[in-house]
Image: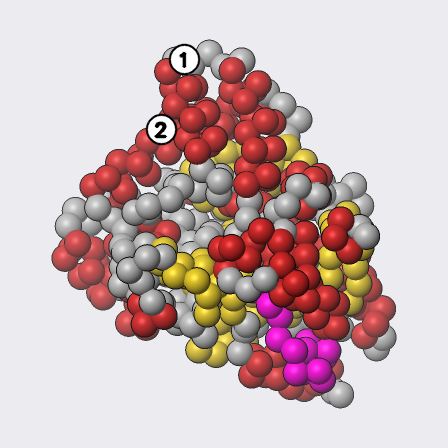
């Protein structure tokens, strides 16, 4: 078995994937295996009893949104009785930021890999709620549910109708341009969100809906610097899933956190998760909050680093340090370090600050373990209590033990 050849095949599939945002649809209609009593969440598998505050809150909110329960107490009782199922987004071709909760009637972005190589795959993500009290941080007040219903009845259908009037939005090209405009694709998405709005606005304006509805949607998207994060995450999921399941490959194809555990998946070990307790991110906190308020790392958004952007592309976004801490030199060094544990440089994602060098892409578990260098991830920090919301942003690394576990499992499977 030639491991290098397997890894080259996997990383080539990842880089050559061409994720196109083609539509918006109800989760139950497009996500494989989705049904009315299933709630998808970020990170590796977890039972209700072990869920963190933000994840529990998001699950309660989703049950109220779906009218599976009508009160908080009823939702908790339903969860405790096994009346709803909890499964990872990643096991259903889906990703979601922070708690990542996706339920059957929620509208989701549809991102298709149109690489033109004969093999295609599709990924999904929920819609971004914006800032403040939001479901992804475990909030489920009346205002949160009202916003979610507006997203399902106005925002999603408007964006979906706009996309139907187009050939789709090339998210690989959008990410590449955003990296040249100061984004890194995970926590800084200001340029990408403006490019997203630029692509959608003329299409939305062509619609036959009420003019006030179109204006409301455009304002919502324009005011939300995270509006492109969810489709970008789905694009990264489509790219990394294209690399998953390559016999003999030691590349990481998912890094995900549920607020309790951190998990990874490996291309040559399909169907397996390798998990350990999630670390608490270290960074900058909003006024009135401190490290003591922080929940352990949570969210599927580390799929961006897995695909070669986010923390791996911090050299492209020196201004990110005003959000996650450190200096512009630290951002540059973060990217340089990641070349040590990756297979290649990205063909399409390049960084002006490094003379347009491609981002480090294709995390190899062998290099991680040999060098003792865990991937760098920049991330939002959730309060440990449901519904408080984001309290800061910072940096985190996965526990080294999960890469060691994966390498041992790989050696056992392949007889090494």
* Residue 366 shown in magenta: yes
User: Quadrant of the rendered structure where residue 273 is?
Assistant: bottom right
* Colouring convention used in this rendered image of the protein: secondary structure
Quadrant placement of the N terminus: bottom right
Quadrant for residue 342, please give it.
Answer: bottom right
How many marks are shown on the rendered structure?
Answer: 2
Residue position for label 2: 153
x and y percentages locating residue 86 in the rendered image: 37, 61
Residue topped by disc 1: 211
Q: Where does residue 227 sit, x and y in percent of width and height?
A: 49, 39
Of residues 10 and 190, the one drawn nearer to the viewer in this rendering: 190
Residues drawn in magenta: 364-377
Q: Residues within 10 Å of mark 1 (few under 14, many from 20)?
A: few
Q: Is residue 199 above or below residue 135?
A: above
Residue 322 highlighted magenta (yes or no):
no
* Front tag of 2 and 1: 1
């Amino acid at each position: 078995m030639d491991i290098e050849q397997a890894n080259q095949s996997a990383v080539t599939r990842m880089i050559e994937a061409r994720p196109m945002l083609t539509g918006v649809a109800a989760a139950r209609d497009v996500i494989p295996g989705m049904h009315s009593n299933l709630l998808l969440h970020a990170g590796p598998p977890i039972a209700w009893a072990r869920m963190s505050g933000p994840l529990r809150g998001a699950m309660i909110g989703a049950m109220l949104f779906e009218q599976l329960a009508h009160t908080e107490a009823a939702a908790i009782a339903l969860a405790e009785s096994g009346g709803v199922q909890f499964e990872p987004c990643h096991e259903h071709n889906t990703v979601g930021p922070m708690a990542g909760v996706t339920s059957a009637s929620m509208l989701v972005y549809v991102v298709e890999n149109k690489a033109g190589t004969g093999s295609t795959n599709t990924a999904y993500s929920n819609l971004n709620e914006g800032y403040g009290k939001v479901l992804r941080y475990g909030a489920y007040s009346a205002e949160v549910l009202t916003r979610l219903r507006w997203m399902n009845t106005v925002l999603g259908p408007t964006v979906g109708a706009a996309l139907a009037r187009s050939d789709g939005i090339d998210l690989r090209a959008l990410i590449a341009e955003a990296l040249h405009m100061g984004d890194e694709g995970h926590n800084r998405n200001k340029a990408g969100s403006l490019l997203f709005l630029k692509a959608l606005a003329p299409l939305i304006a062509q619609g036959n809906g009420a003019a006030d509805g179109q204006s409301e949607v455009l304002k919502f998207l324009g005011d939300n610097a995270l509006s492109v994060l969810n489709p970008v995450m789905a694009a990264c999921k489509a790219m990394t899933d294209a690399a998953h399941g390559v016999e003999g490959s030691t590349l990481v194809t998912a890094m995900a956190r549920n607020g309790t555990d951190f998990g990874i998946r490996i291309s040559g070990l399909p169907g397996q998760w390798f998990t350990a307790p999630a670390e608490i991110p270290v960074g900058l906190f909003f006024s009135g909050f401190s490290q003591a308020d922080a929940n352990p790392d949570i969210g599927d958004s580390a799929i961006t680093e897995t695909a070669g952007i986010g923390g791996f592309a911090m050299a492209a976004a020196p201004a990110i340090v005003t959000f996650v801490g450190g200096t512009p030199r630290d951002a540059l060094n973060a990217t340089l370090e990641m070349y040590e544990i990756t297979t290649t440089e990205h063909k399409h994602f390049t960084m002006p600050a490094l003379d347009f060098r491609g981002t480090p892409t294709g995390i190899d578990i062998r290099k991680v373990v040999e060098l003792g260098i865990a991937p760098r991830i920049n991330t939002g920090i959730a309060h440990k209590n449901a519904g408080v919301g984001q309290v800061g942003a910072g940096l985190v690394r996965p526990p080294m033990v999960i890469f060691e576990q994966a390498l041992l499992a790989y050696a056992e499977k392949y007889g090494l």
